[in-house]
Image (cartoon, helix red, strand yellow):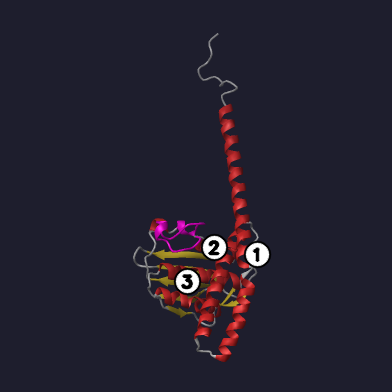
Amino acid sequence: MRLRADGPAPADAASPDRDEAATLRREVETLRRALAERDAFLAGVAHELRNPMTPILGQVERLLATAEREAPEGRVAQGLVQLRWLVERYVRRATTLLDVSRVQAGQLALLAAPVPLAEVVEEVVASLRPMAAHAGSAITVTVPDDLVLSCERLALDQILDNLVTNAIKYGDGSAITVSGLRDGAVARIRVSDRGIGIAPSDQARIFERFERAVGDPSQAPAGFGVGLWLVRRLAEAMEGGVALDSRPGEGATFTVTLPLHA
């Protein structure tokens, strides 16, 4: 009896495919567990880094209040102002790590409330002016007082802090502008610099976790590479978004869109 050439394959022919699929599933599960363990580790590190700073910052505030009463223009008061900024900066970096782990675990709950945009921008810019001055950048703010957003204030603070910090790092000493405008039912918040810019091929990549705006790690400023990823996730969680307009050598403009308070 002759067998058809296109007849059914032997029963064991599909076995290698099944084995390969099972191996891939095991590898995927192993990677998922590794990522979960890494995020848990980051959360633990963030807590350990941030918690001791709270009493330190409180002590600095008390010493600064005393120094400002006794000699407001003295070197001690000026040094304590700088120390307070450094401690606050440290706390913000630890908070960024904690926020990353919360987003990944689906534990970042954002509660919308009326938030005056100009007020938050001024607070963030004031806290970052020493860093900008050190980099040789001046920051100009143009935000109408009547722009009231529907968002979480702390998340908005984190978005602005990350974008202005990014502009200082990559602005190459150029002027930085922070502006806001009304566009129908939303506000558009723009942070611009005239620095090194971002190549078109990198503009989608930089919104991913642990990615940097500079391709060569040896040339990148210090940081975790999660700031822009967090900006995108926070904006989207508040029914907004973020866009980028940039050309190499011509700077970058990040535009965050968030809903206005009705």
Q: Residues within 10 Å of mark 2 (few under 14, many from 20)?
A: many
Q: Give amino acid for label 2.
A: Leu
Q: Give amino acid for label 1.
A: Ala
- Which residue in the structure is indicated by mark 2? 230
Residue 93 on image: x %, y %: 55, 66
Pick the quarter of the image with the N terminus: top right
Q: Which mark is residue 164?
A: 3
- Look at the magenta stretch and give its main secondary structure: loop
What is the CA distance from the residue labelled 2 to the residue labelled 3?
A: 14 Å
- At mark 1, the secondary structure is loop
**For the residues bearing labels 2 and 1, Cβ distance under 8 angstroms:** no
Q: Give amino acid for label 3.
A: Val
- At mark 2, the secondary structure is helix
Residue at 47% x, 70% y: name it. 165
Q: Which mark is residue 109?
A: 1
- At mark 3, the secondary structure is helix
For residue 262, say whether it is visible.
no
